[in-house]
Image (cartoon, coloured by chain):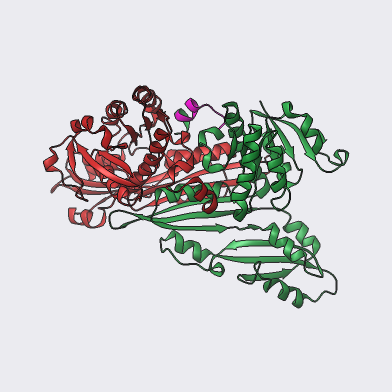
Chain colours: A red, B green
Amino acid sequence: MIKIGILGYGNIGRGVEAAVTNANDMELAGVFTRRDPESVETETGAKVYKVDDLYNMKDEIDVLMLCGGSANDLPVQTPEFAKYFNVIDSFDTHAKIPEHFENVNKSALEGENVAIISVGWDPGLFSLNRLYAQSILPNGNDYTFWGKGVSQGHSDAIRNIPSVKDARQYTIPVESALNAVRNGENPELTTRDKHTRDCYVVAEEGADKKQIENDIVTMPNYFDEYDTTVTFITQEELDANHAGIPHGGIVFRSGTTGLNNEMSHIIEYKLTLDSNPQFTASVLIAYARAAYRLSKNGESGCKTVFDIAPGLLHPESPEFQRKNCL
Amino acid sequence: MIKIGILGYGNIGRGVEAAVTNANDMELAGVFTRRDPESVETETGAKVYKVDDLYNMKDEIDVLMLCGGSANDLPVQTPEFAKYFNVIDSFDTHAKIPEHFENVNKSALEGENVAIISVGWDPGLFSLNRLYAQSILPNGNDYTFWGKGVSQGHSDAIRNIPSVKDARQYTIPVESALNAVRNGENPELTTRDKHTRDCYVVAEEGADKKQIENDIVTMPNYFDEYDTTVTFITQEELDANHAGIPHGGIVFRSGTTGLNNEMSHIIEYKLTLDSNPQFTASVLIAYARAAYRLSKNGESGCKTVFDIAPGLLHPESPEFQRKNCL
């Protein structure tokens, strides 16, 4: 059994807890938190420890899942804990991945551990599909669409507007853009062409709704480059109809082959997810299995999904995989 | 530059020839054939040699692409040439992969070469997607659909019927079955539920068309378990409208996560291909790059797509990949 530790007990941490119960070759060693452990109740009854307890539990954990945020937690935690554990994180600040990789690699080599960073679906499975498809169709265009799904960042941005009590923002791909790509038209798409943004907003009593709507649709970076719809609803409606965290998206490669580029091909990879954090956690857990196997095999250092042979993710043996999956 | 040899100059061999011209880091060392080399003219003007010339050209070829058939050629050729070259094949007799793997592995270890077998899209990219998706969603169902596309095997089977001059068979996924899977209904699907078969047949003059149609739709294994449509056309119509070799298909994983399987997720991987052999050849060429890199790194033995880290397929460096693809 692979012994899994969870650091950080938010949505992703709870998702990892659930994913471990669905993996026949894994068991949960414990949840680690910066909060008072007494104040945290886990969904499976798994034991909760203080972060500092980790330093005394090296032998009780095979892979530590770092379930904090990319802005403040992971840039510190992944390099720190890669010194002592095999670790997996879901660092998703694309622009800072090279720097994060270098920091984590140094620690992981020093501690002779395996660290796999930026695991999830984007970065993660979507990155893999971009890489595979570019490798197969060097002449072509990439298209990535997100949604329909909840963007936590955009929902937070709306909640920060004065007189807004609560909000939920959905990112929605534009159907005509999807169809143009599927038809092999290789369209040039602006930001506005690709996605629309739907906002459900709970305003405080007596708020100036026109002002709130204007503040949203003109917000730089978040909304100004998109066609944005704002709908005011009650807190009850939001709680009843918008409590979930669905997401998903599509990665396309539209490319040509032949001596005169006479043949066209479309590769499409689509995710439709009821729960973004539970699915992300399920990807993390598959890569935990790979980290464990690589570490047992004497490897160390920082890796990404690009470095991991797919067979390492699957619970069964290479012989089984060749017989049943190939 | 990676020097590529091609053994067998049919549709796949010609596809590899074209794919090499689209790869900036590769060049064609030569085409090798069992026919009289004088009788073979390549599309790029590449030099043509006899098969036996291979034994004298070990230093001029980094990776040999085995482009023969799975029934008779590859079971002999791949073990033979893995003794002398890094090799790639597209062996697609699923049931015989374990045996083929063992034979090729022995030769490749003996010759200290890298052999990657069963490369293409099914087996190949579809297998990879089944494996990744099973690893991420252990609770779930797999669905593989093929088409719309030309099945060479089924077209040949029709051509073997008396009084049939020519034929083209299309495999077509049933739209309602696709939609049921996409909706997360996890349907149980029979062979008949998943695909229909459309046949375009050129009959000889005076042939009994009713008899031909009956021979097709009742043919065991090939057609009897499917809803099959037979349309008689002229040779001119067949040549004009059915000359291409398009194909494709979809791999789905429909799975659940959560402590009570309360969240559903769909992973969909779809290929839409103008030319089955050109696309297959493009996959082969990407894996040739991986075989070359692994061999340079001192590895040997037989591998499948499950053993190959994705980054090895991409022409750019790991640093570039992390910065631009992750």
Q: Position of residue A26 (x, y in %)?
A: 33, 46
From this viewpoint, is residue B119 visible?
Answer: no
Task: Please determine whether, in this image, residue B316 is positioned above or below residue B250.
Answer: above
Q: Assign the C terminus of chain B to one quadrant of the image.
A: top left
Task: Please determine whether, in this image, residue B271 is positioned above or below residue B288.
Answer: below
From this viewpoint, is residue B252 visible?
Answer: yes
Q: Position of residue B49 (x, y in %)?
A: 82, 35
Q: Which image quadrant for residue B205?
A: bottom right
Q: Could you say which is closer to the camera, residue A225 or residue B51?
A: B51
Q: Which image quadrant for residue A194?
A: top left
Q: Assign the N terminus of chain B to one quadrant of the image.
A: top right
Per the image, is B27 magenta? no
Q: Position of residue A139 (x, y in %)?
A: 61, 36
Q: Residue at x 82, y 43 (%)?
A: B34
Q: Could you say which is closer to the camera, residue A202 or residue A320?
A: A320
Left or right of residue B16, residue A42 in this image: left
Total numbered badges shown on the rendered structure: 0
Range shown magenta = B314-322
Per the image, is B320 magenta? yes
Left or right of residue A226, residue A29 in this image: left
Q: Position of residue A119 (x, y in %)?
A: 38, 38
Left or right of residue B25, residue A235 in this image: left
Q: Residue at x 63, y 40 (%)?
A: B106
Q: Could you say which is closer to the camera, residue B160 or residue B325?
A: B160
Q: Residue at x 63, y 31 (%)?
A: B112
